[in-house]
Amino acid sequence: MTLTAAAASATDVLAPDAGAPARLRFEHVRKEFTVRGDRRRAPSTLVAVDDLSLDVAAGELVTVVGPSGCGKSTLLDLVAGLSTPTSGRILVDGREVTGPGLDRGIVFQQYALLPWRSAQRNVELGLEARGLPAPERRRVAREKLELVGLAGFEDRYPHELSGGMKQRVAIARALAFDPEVLLMDEPFAALDAQTREQLQDELLRIWRATGKTIVFITHGIEEAVYLGQRVVVLSGRPGRVRTVIDVDLPRGDELAGTDLRTDPRFVAHRHTVWEALHAPAGTPERTGGAA
Amino acid sequence: MTTTISRDAGPTAGPRTDPATDAIGVDAPAFADPPTLGRRNVLAVRGGSGRARRTGLVVLRSSLAFVAFFALWELAPRLGWVDPVFLPPLSTVLATFGGLVADGTLAEQVGTSLVRAVSGFAIAVSFAIPAGVLIGWNDRAAQYLSPFLEVLRNTAALALLPVFILVLGIGETSKIAIVVYACSFPILLSTITGVRTVDPLLVRSARSLGLGRVALFTKVVLPAAVPTVFTGVRMAATASILVLIAAEMVGAKAGLGFYITYTQFNFQIPEMYAGILTIALVGVAVNTLLVTVERRLSRWRTA
Ligand SMILES: Nc1ncnc2c1ncn2[C@@H]1O[C@H](COP(=O)(O)OP(=O)(O)O)[C@@H](O)[C@H]1O
Ligand SMILES: [Mg+2]
């Protein structure tokens, strides 16, 4: 497929030699749901994701955009191992995903923190289940909270934290096992604009500091372009890859205090993604047939 | 489906919407929540100046109805609006109450009733919570058993009293048994609900963190269910006292319910009112105790 070619060209700096397996690989993934019918209608099948193929290289930050309901969360559940594809496979470092695993950390939009546990104890949750001794758990949790800029907030309960802080705790928790892949499902969608921009920069900092492979799902075009090295544009339901756009923008030190969002190159990329999202159904990229 | 957010937003909303509330609510108007909730609302709405003044206002407001009620109780018999033989003035009743407290009569009756209520309640808690957890955790079991349990819960415990007496006799066993029966269903059903309505997002995120079935259960499902379970526990405690008093009125040789019917038969009207007053006090005390424990257990829910 053309996608694989795009993936290879986009990541020639980061990706290892062409023969090595991608860190994360989607192979013709399809996910159907059986929608329960009411008294009059028989159960029907809803195709949430259809024939989706994509490679993500190690250390890459890929953003996925698509209209609401196009199967983004479904895709993330599949990578997380919380559900299984109807057909096709998902591979992490060449191994097929068969269930949840500690090589993948997940951040949900609604934080999903346990309200009766402090920030520290929330981060420790997975480590406890793993049977890590208490002092070790505490050390790791503190370290991760510090990484996300929450040193000093270890003993706060979720209801004592702002939305942005809760999401930082959730990120720290997902990083507790040092997973190779970090999956994020519209993590900043519930935050106000200012907090969101702050956390976007924070995420870029964490990404550079840790070198994780990140798949970041969003429905915001600007967010997708700002964060992603590549932007994967999904079509409306069923979700398929419509196109993949390489984002080539000055980063880090190059940027030096200027507002990237007003940079002409940023604006141009944003427009490209916008056009891809709004292209009428049946554009060349979209393989017809099944529907 | 409850999300964490809505959970934070409505700490007092959960118990109110519990399906198990209605049946017991009908049985138990005397010890139900409203006074406590009312006070909490006043505190929440009032903003601003002096804390002492605010507390004073709250006390004044909540005691106004009591003052009016007690004044009416005192005056109506004295002014001849009602027959003082059937409704003695409050002062007479209080004097009798004082005497009965002093000579230990009330303590004895309260003691007898509390032992029965607490035994039945404890037995119900110790088996209904584990049973509810097992049923709630098992989809199949919940599907098969829920309708049946719902029917049992809606069979008023007192209607079964003759059956209990027939089978278990008139002694302590039948009274404790009926308390066990009345307490079991609120606890059982709210535990099932609590276990089954845990936010699926919490479960998904815990699974993604590598928690297995057992860890998921002990670290996520159980703690999340505690507030719902406790709503049932509190309803059960209220039900235990009500059902017991009624059972004691029908057939017993001691206890508060027995004391009230006994004094009525013997035309010791002030004593009868003293007994009724005692029941009210016991009810309020039990409810206050449980509300305190509940706050302790779900402190994380309040901002
Ligand atoms: N468990 C499920 N059962 C049935 N339909 C589902 C289920 N999960 C998601 N869907 C449907 O699949 C489609 C994609 O959902 P989702 O992945 O949540 O979209 P997105 O995250 O892109 O908004 C939606 O139409 C949704 O209704
Ligand atoms: Mg979604």
Image: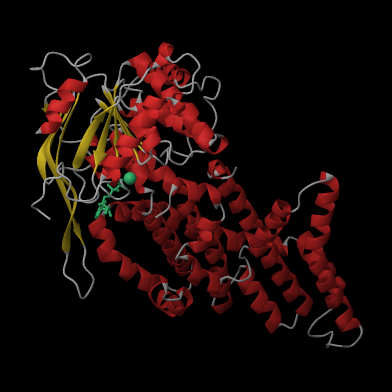
Tell whether B189 sits left or right of B283: left
Quarter holding residue B258: bottom right
x and y, in percent, of residue B284 in the image? 67, 60
Q: Which residue is drawn at 38% across and 27% down?
A: A266
In the rendered image, the residue lying farthest to the top is: A253
User: Relative to A29, is B272 above or below?
Assistant: below
x and y, in percent, of residue B14 in the image? 50, 56
* Picture quarter with the N terminus of chain B: bottom left
Quarter holding residue A131: top left
Q: Which residue is drawn at 17% across and 50% down?
A: A282
Give whichever of A241, A135 is nearer the camera: A241
Give whichever of A14, B183 is nearer the camera: A14
Tally of numbered tags: 0
Give whichever of A112, A246 is nearer the camera: A246
User: Relative to A91, is B127 above or below?
Assistant: below
Tell whether A235 sits left or right of B196: left
x and y, in percent, of residue A21 in the image? 11, 21
**Picture colour scheme:** secondary structure
User: Relative to A240, is B118 above or below?
Assistant: below
x and y, in percent, of residue A60 in the image? 26, 22
Give whichever of A285, A134 is nearer the camera: A285
Visible residue check, residue A121: no
Q: Residue at x 49, y 27 (%)?
A: A198
* Picture quarter with the C terminus of chain B: top right
Quarter holding residue A42: bottom left
Visible residue check, residue A265: yes
Q: Residue at x 83, y 88 (%)?
A: B83
